[in-house]
Amino acid sequence: MHDKVPHLDVDSIRSLTGTSFAVAHFARMMPLPFLGHDWTADERAEIRRLEKFCEASDDWILECSHTDAGDPWCVVYDERHQRIVVHIARLEGRLVVVMPRAQRVANTTSMTAAVEMALNELRSSVRG
């Protein structure tokens, strides 16, 4: 996809979420074999809402992949400002939403709630 996507500061995420996990760099990665941890069909439907929002922007791209452990993640990357706007990942069975600009991390068990948080952050980025 895009080689410009940077990695998140994992130590900051760990301190905000209180978890320990390995996160792959968000630079272009080789596809991993399916490990049984992919997004469900319902989760992918929610992710499509993010994709549609990004398609309406000239600057944002949605990139999804997996950690080395097989956990899925998606980021919305702002190409103009060269930063991640929002990051959603399933880690240790829960969904983590990272909003770097707001310096906020949220945990949820609902992909609908995770995507709503992400969309609210994107809308805020447009206004701010």
Image: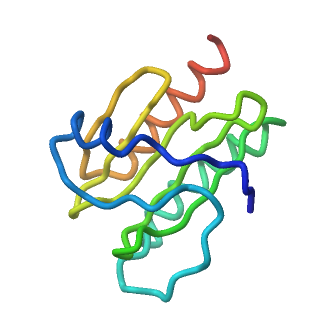
Q: Residue 92 appears in which quarter of the rendering?
A: bottom left
Q: Is residue 95 left or right of residue 75?
A: left
Residue 64 % position (x, y): 57, 61
Q: Residue at x 50, y 54 (%)?
A: 46
Q: Residue at x 53, y 61 (%)?
A: 45
Specify the farthest residue to the left: 18
Q: Is residue 38 above or below residue 19?
A: below
Residue 117 % position (x, y): 42, 34
Residue 81 % position (x, y): 72, 28
Q: Residue at x 43, y 20 (%)?
A: 102
Q: How many marks?
A: 0
Image quarter in which the C terminus is found:
top right
Q: How is the image coloured?
A: rainbow
Q: Is residue 28 above or below residue 35?
A: above
Camera-side residue of 110 and 28: 28
Q: Is residue 95 above or below residue 56?
A: below
Image quarter in which the N terminus is found:
bottom right
Camera-side residue of 39 and 74: 74
Q: Is residue 124 above or below residue 119?
A: above
Specify the farthest residue to the top: 128
Camera-side residue of 67 and 58: 67
Q: Is residue 47 left or right of residue 3?
A: left
Q: Residue at x 40, y 73 (%)?
A: 68
Q: Is residue 38 left or right of residue 49?
A: left
Residue 23 % position (x, y): 38, 58
